[in-house]
Amino acid sequence: MPPASDLFVNDDVKPEQIRQSWEKVAAEAMRLDVIPPAFEQLRRKKRRRKPVPYDLIPGSLARMLCADWWYRKLWQMRCEWREEQLRAVCLVNKKASPYVSYEAVIHKREQRRKSLEFFQSHELVNADGDTLDMEDVVNASSSNPAHRRNEMMACVKGLELIAEMRGDCAVFYTITCPSRFHATLNNGRPNLKWTSETVRQSSDYLVDTFAAFRKAMHKAGLRWYGVRVAEPAPRRHRTLALAVLHAQKRPSHPHCAAA
């Protein structure tokens, strides 16, 4: 098989050979707990209904062969590992620093400051020669946190209006992980029941819990709609709207006990 670096310039290479090379590089990335780009679309499945999207392989493979891509991934892993260490020594909690560590907040502020300086010092020029300030373009896009917050509130308000028009009942859920996922107690002291579960594992638990909830609702024949709000903590908030009669007979499921 040709080297991975020669796959894009050799016309005799078949798509399946490129995929096999991608699988080898992806396996090395998975050993470091790094999810390869387009992994879900390209991984082998027993019951694949759609053809393999070979057009995604060149971009995915090029990223995994790029040093800059690996630098960003390893830096992200370093930051996550550092947060877990600070969380384990009780420096991330309601009393000390809620949600994330103080070091992470300082780093994020410095990153935003550098980004702002970059936007203020550059301009965008289109094909017609018109010039726009990059800062104005960024602030007008969805990259602006204020716009994302307004979009979320508009979505929640729209669902509320639809529920009122249909005469449905709105139910607010807060799904929290069990005690074994919490490193500290409410007073900031260590939680003796914590089993070293990470934040990512907490997120996976919440995803599986809500999947069980959706399955139970579907099995009971209850139709619903709503919006989810996630926060950097082992809990999720959801506002669901469903018919009044359905709200009175919500399913009872073992995995939904945390709701």
Image (tube, grey):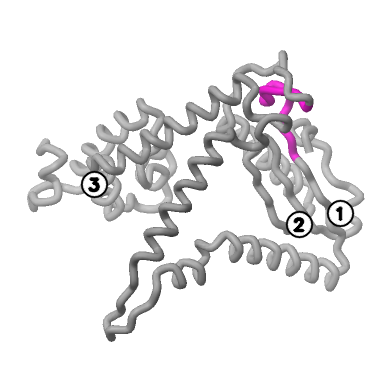
Give the distance between the C-alpha atoms of the residues marked 1 and 3, in whole angstroms: 50 Å
Kind of residue sitting beneath label 3? Ala
Is residue 137 shown above or below 43? Answer: below
Residue in the picture at 66% in, 42% down? 211
Image location of residue 139, percent across then percent down = 50, 68
Mark-to-mark CA distance, 2 and 3: 42 Å
Residue at mark 1 = 246
Neighbor class of circle 2 (other Cα within 10 Å; few <14, some 14-19, many 20+) is some
Name the residue rendered at 67%, 25% in the picture. Answer: 181
Mark sitting earlier along the chain (2/3): 3
* Residue 194 placement: quadrant: top right
Residue drawn 16% across and 40% down?
Answer: 4
Q: Is residue 3 left or right of residue 190?
A: left
Percent position (x, y) of residue 191? 72, 18
Q: Amino acid type of disc 2?
A: Trp
Tell me the quadrant of the picture where the N terminus can be found. top left
Q: Quadrant of the C terminus?
A: top right
* Viewer-nearest residue: 26 or 65: 65
Residue at the disc numbered 3: 62
- Decide: is 79 above or below 145: above
Compared to 60, does 23 lie above or below?
Answer: above
Asked whether disc 1 touches disc 2, contact meaning CB atoms under 8 Å apart, the reply is yes
Give the mark nearer the N terminus: 1 vs 2. 2
What is the magenta range?
175-186
> Which type of secondary structure does the marked residue at label 2 adopt?
strand
Residue ID for mark 2: 224
At horizontal 40% and vertical 53% (from top left) the residue drawn is: 50
